Image: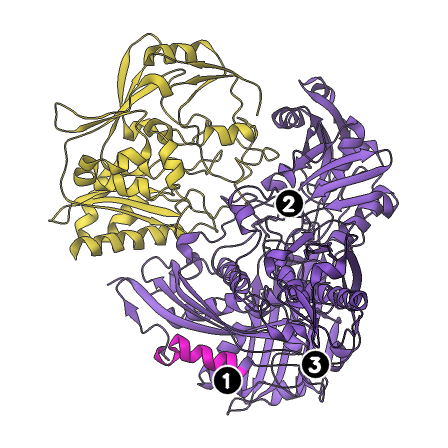
Amino acid sequence: MRPFTYERARTPAEAAAAATREPGAKFIAGGTNLLDLMKLQIEVPTHLVDVNGLGLDRIEATPEGGLRIGALVRNTDLAADERVRRDYAVLSRAIVAGASGQIRNKATTAGNLLQRTRCPYFYDTAQPCNKRVPGSGCSAIGGVTRALAVIGTSEACIATHPSDMAVAMRALDATVETVKADGTTRRIPMAEFHRLPGETPHIETSLEKGEFITAVTLPPPMGGRHFYRKVRDRASYAFALVSVAAVVQRDGTGRVALGGVAHKPWRVEAAEAELPRGAKPAMAAILDGAKPTHDNAFKVKLAERALAAVLAEARG
Amino acid sequence: MKFDTPATTNPIDRLKVVGQPLDRIDGPFKTTGTAPYAYERHGVAPNQAYGFVLGAGIAKGRVNAMDTAAARRAPGVLAIVTTLDMPKLEKGQTNAAALFGGAEIQHYHQAVAVVVAETFEQARDAAGLIRVDYARQPGRFDLAAEARHAPLVGGDSEEGSGAPPEDRVGDFEGAFAAAPVKLDETYTTPDESHAAMEPHASIAAWEGDRLTVWTSNQMIAWGKRDLAKTLGLKPENVRIDSPYVGGGFGGKLFLRADAVLAALGAKAAGRPVKLALTRPLVANNTTHRPATIQRIRLGATRDGKITAIAHESTSGNLKDGKPETAVSQTKLLYAGANRLTSMRMAEMDLPEGNAMRAPGEAPGLMALEVAIDEMAERLGMDPVEFRILNDTQEDPEKPGRRFSQRQLVQCLRQGAERFGWANRNFRPGTRREGRWLVGMGVAAGFRNNLLTKSAARVRLDGQGVVTVETDMTDIGTGSYTIIAQTAAEMMGVPIGKVVVRLGDSDFPASAGSGGQWGANNSTAGVYAACVKLREQVAQKLGINSADAVFEDGQVRAGNRAAPLGQAAGPEGLSAEDVIEYGDLAKRYQQSTFAGHFVEVGVDAMTGETRVRRMLAVCAAGRILNPKSARSQVIGAMTMGVGAALTEALEVDTRHGFFVNHDLAGYEVPVHADIPHQEVIFLDEVDPVSSPMKAKGVGELGLCGVGAAVANAIHNATGIRVRDYPITLDKLIERLPEPA
C-alpha cells in the first residue's frame, strides 16, 4: 500500500470534483476490492475520496414503476429488499451467489459494478498485465487461462468481469446514473457501461475521470420467472466459471446474460429470439464468435448446458 | 525408557482420563483470542519493528543488481537486507532450496530482500520500491515434459513413507503378461499447497550472539538445528518458541525464510523484528506437495486374486529435493506374489516440493485406490469384496513379517454396513435424484505408524500440581490435551491439576508434529518421564514403587496413603526421560487402516460435484481422545475432498510459478462443500507401538478420501477421470445430452 491522502465528500458533485481535481484519486465506499488491491500495490491511488457519508443508501420507486437503487445501498440490503425479491428475483439471486455475507454487508451497488478482474496475472505484480501497466503485455494469454474469457477478448487482454450482480442488472436493462464534477448528470445503459478490452483493457467502463455513480435504476418489472445459475468449482465463495442470468416468460421468450465469459456481462439481445427453440441454438447465437483457449473451451459447452438447465426448470 | 518388548498392563490401561472425549484444554484460549500466534506475540520482546519479505519475480536466473535507494528513503524504514549483501547461506538439513543469500535464483518468489520499518505498512510500501535487475534463464517447469527423461530415485519422506528407486518381488512382468484380467492406467495428481490459515510468521530478537525466535513451527528441534546451521550460530545460542501453531500440514515442518529473515532483519535493524510471509509467498516461497504421474498395472485371476501389481511414480523437485513417495503404500496394502514399485524424480525449477500431510500415501492412494476400483469393475466384483479378497496379514514383500494390527477388512465391512453400501447402484450412472446423478465410492485408507524418540520433563509441586514440559507442538491437533490426559492418568490426578507447556526448544526434545507420529510418541515420552517421577515419589515416601497406586491425588501402598503433593515437598520433584524404541518396528509392520465411504451428487447438466455424505472407519490403535481424534479425521476428510475436487497449484509452464497463489485462486473446501461426516474408531489397542498402545490417526483420515470421491463420481456418472482435481470440465463432454 502506498501512502495516500484522504477526504470525506459531502455531496456527490463534491466527490466528483475532488476526484477530478486529483490525478490519482479514487472513490472508496465498501473497499472490499480496492483495499485488497492497494495492499498488493495493484491499485496505487494517491488520494481517496470517501463517499460513505453521502447517503445514497435508499431503494425508491421511480415514477415509471421501476426502482432506483442508491449507489451506496449495500449488497446485502439490495438482495434482501422485498420489492427486489418479488419483482427482480434474478438480481437478489445473483447477489447472494457472490462473495460472503460479511463482504456483501460492506460492498455497495456502485462498488460492485466497479470491481476489477480476478485474472491471476493481474494479481501478480511481477507479471506483465495491460490492465495493471498499460502496454506491458498480457501474460495470461498462453498461460493458465481456465477461468478467463472466451468471447469479446483481444490480443491485449482475456480477463473477465467478476461481478454476479452486474450480470443480473444487464439482463434487467438497468441504467447507471452519474454526476460529473460540473454537476451535470447522465444515464448510462448497462449495455454501454462496461467495455470490452480492445487495445485499452485498463479502461473498463465508460465513466469519465471523476464521474461519480449516484444510482442504478431498474425499469418496471417484466414478470416472468427469474433465474441466476452460477456454476463454480466449489459450492460457495468462488467466482463463476459461467453464470446465467435469465428471465423466462410463459411463452418461452426471455432474456439471458452471462457472467464469467467476457470482460463485461455478456448479453446479445438479437440472440434471444432463439430462446424458444432451446438452449443449443440460443447459446450458439449468444456465443457466436467465441475464441476460447484450450483450457477454457469447456465454458462454451458449459454455458449451453447451464442455459438448458435453466430452461428446463422454467418449463417445469 | 527403552521400549523394546510389547507393552503389558500399565497405568494408562485404567483409562480414567486417557481415552476420554475431553474438550481441548487450549480451546477457551483459542476462542477468546488468548492463545497468541507467532505474529501476535507483541509482549515477548520490546520495541518490535516490522519486516516484509520481497520474493523474486523470476523462477530461474540471477540477480544482477538491486536498487534500494528509494526504499531506504521511504518513511519509517530502518534497515534493508538484500540477497546480494551476503553469500548464499548454508542450507538446513531439511531444506532443498536455499533460503537466502547470493545472486542465484532457484525458484519463483525466493526471498531476495527483507525490509524493516516502524510499521508493517511502511515496510510493505518500501519493499515495493526496490528495483531488481534480473538475468533470466530458461527453466524446467513442465512435469509431463521432464518426466520423459527422469531417472530412478529412491527416497524417504521423513514422514514414514519411503521406497527405493526400484523394488521387485517375484516376476512382475511375467505374471502381468499371464494374467487373464489386467489394468494398465496412468493417473496424475497436481501440486498442492498446505494453505494453513496462519501463514509462516516469526519474531526474532538478538541478545549479543544469542538469538530467540518466536515462530510457528511443527518441529522445534529441527528448526533450532537448521536455524543455527543456516546462520552459522552455535545451537546452544538459538532458542525457538512455538506454543501455538495455526495449522501446519507439513508446511511448517522445516525452517523457512520467515525465521531466517526475521533474524537477519533484527540484526540489521538492531531491534526485534516480526514478519509474516504473504499468501503468494506461502505458495511459491515455501514448500508444496509435488505433482505426480503414476502408472499402475494390475493383473488378477478371473476370480479376483491379484497376481501382479506395479506402481511407478514420477515427480519433480529441485536438484537437492526428494521424490514424492507415492508408491510406498503399494508395497504393503494388498497381497500379490509379483510386485514392482519404482520412483523417478525429474529435476525441475519450481519451488521446493516437500512433505504435506501424509506425503506419499495421500497422492499414492489417490491413484492406487482408483486403479483397484477400476479393476473390481473389470472383474465384475464389488469393490469392497475385491479389497477384502486381496487383504494380507503379513508384509507382502517379506513373508512372515506380520502387521502388529491390521483391521482393514473390519473397517471395510463395518463401513459398508453403516453406510448402506448394499444400496449402491452396481451399474454406474443409473441413479438420478432431480438434477443430480448420485453415486457411492469406497477406498481403503492406509498410513504407516512411525516410532521416533521423544523426551519430556515432569515436575510435581507441593500442591500436587503436575507440570509437563516438552518441545512437542500442538498444531491444532490436541497435543496439549492428550499430554495432560497422559500425565493425569499416570500420576493419578484430575486433568485440572496438570499444566502442559509446549513448543520451547529449552524443553526436552520431542518427536514433534509430523507424519501422524506426534500423539503416540510424545505421550509415550511423557509416560516415560512419569514412570521416573512415580519412582521418585515412591522413594520419597519410602514405599516400593511397584506397590504404589497413584489415584485421586494420592499415593497408596498397602494401608499407607499420602497426598501426592506431600511427597513433592516444598522443593518439588522433577523427572525427565525419553522414550526410545528397539526393533519392534522392524519385527512388526506397524500401520493404520481405514475404510472411506463417500456419496456424491454430480449435476447432470453442469458436472459440478458436491459431496453428500462421508464416513471413515478407522483402526489406529488406542484412541487417546475420541473428540480430538475425530476432529483430526474430519479435517483430513475435508482435505481429501479438496484434493479430489478443487485443489491444484496451477503451474505457468512458461514462467515457472504457481499462478493461483492466494486463497481466492487456490480453492480449499468451504463449509458449503462439506456435508455430513461420520467417523468410527474400531476398538483397538496396539501393544507393539508404545506403552500408550496408540498409533497416529491425523493423516489416516486423508489417505484414500480422494480416491473414494473419484470412485463415487464414476459410480454416479460412469465417467472415469484419472487426472485430479476432478473439475467439471473433465466431465462435461461426457455427461448425458440434455433432454
Provide residue B616's location: percent of width, then percent of height. 49, 70
Left or right relative to B530: residue A291: left
In the rendered image of the structure, the colour used to display chain B is purple
Give SS at disc 1.
Answer: helix
Magenta region includes residue A100? no
Check disc 3 and report the residue beneath it: B8
The span picked out in magenta is B409-423
From the image, state whether disc 3 or disc 1 is nearer to you: 3
Pointer 2: what residue? B284
Q: Nearer the viewer, mark 2 or mark 3?
A: 3
Quadrant in the picture for the C terminus of chain B: bottom left
| Dot placed on the residue nearer the N-terminal end, 3 or 1 | 3
- Chain letter for the yellow part: A
Calculate the distance from the C-alpha at mark 2 to the C-alpha at mark 3. 49 Å
Residue at numbered disc 1 = B386
**What is the quadrant of the N terminus of chain B in the image?**
bottom right
Chain of the residue under label 3: B
Counting other residues with Cα less than 10 Å from the Cα at mark 2, is it few (<14), some (14-19), or many (20 or more)?
Answer: many
Q: Left of B17 or right of it: where is B151?
A: right
- The chain identifier of the residue carrying mark 1 reads B
In the displayed structure, B392 sits above or below B711; it is below
Residue under the image location 72 percent in, 84 percent down: B169
Q: What secondary structure is found at the residue carrying circle 2?
A: helix
